[in-house]
Image (tube, rainbow, N blue to C red):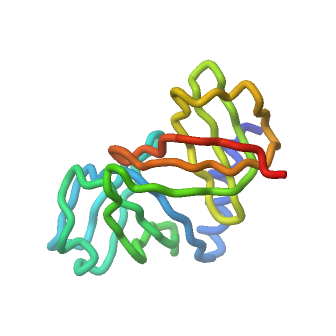
Amino acid sequence: MSKKVLVLSVMAVFMLLGVSYGASITGVIESIAKDKGTFSVRDQKIEVGFSCDGSLLKDLSNGDSVKVEYSIESGKAKAVSVNKVSDQGKGEIVGTIKHIDKSKNSLIVKDKEIEIGFDCSGTPLNDFKEGDTVIVNYTVKDGREIAEHIKKKL
């Protein structure tokens, strides 16, 4: 079973059971309707639509890079917080490499709560493999996480 099918299956079970769960996405606002309390965010792979308390959107516009913390309740994504990330926002994640694509210079790292996909252009990946625990220092530019430094955690 592919990873995508597995994730969709798990989400479907949560939706059917009415279970809520949380996640986050960092990306660029594609559309926004402040009066309706709705907006959508696109990261490197997907676009997600959200509903929220409209006050979360007052200082935001199309094209802003944001990090959205959200919950899924009854099959709908509801934003809990929306924060702008500067083009040079910095972050660090300690987690396990879930997928590595050396030909595309990308990898996906999962910590206890989230998975983040990284653009690793300019960062050698030859010393890493899936399953390695790593520390990734990165910047956020145009809603994309760009790895600046990756090292194995000992």
Tell me the quarter of the picture where residue 118 sits. top right
Instruction: Locate residue 42 relative to residue 5 in the image: left or right.
Output: left
Residue 11 lies, in percent from the top left, at 62, 60
Task: Please name the residue shown 39% across and 56% down the image.
Answer: 89
**Vertical placement of residue 142 versus 66, above or below:** above
Task: Please name the residue shown 41% across and 62% down the image.
Answer: 67
Task: Please name the residue shown 36% across and 45% down the image.
Answer: 141
Task: Please name the residue shown 63% across and 37% down the image.
Answer: 107
Between 137 and 129, the residue placed more toward the observer is: 137
Tell me the quarter of the picture where residue 104 sits. top right
**Vertical placement of residue 35 versus 129, above or below:** below
Tell me the quarter of the picture where residue 144 sits. top left
- Badge count: 0
Instruction: Locate residue 25 relative to residue 87 in the image: left or right.
Output: right
Residue extending furthest toward the left: 35
Between 57 and 129, the residue placed more toward the observer is: 129
Residue 53 lies, in percent from the top left, at 29, 80
The quarter of the picture where the N terminus appears is: top right
Instruction: Locate residue 144 relative to residue 51 in the image: left or right.
Output: right
Between 102 and 23, the residue placed more toward the observer is: 102
Residue 19 lies, in percent from the top left, at 63, 76
Residue 117 lies, in percent from the top left, at 56, 43
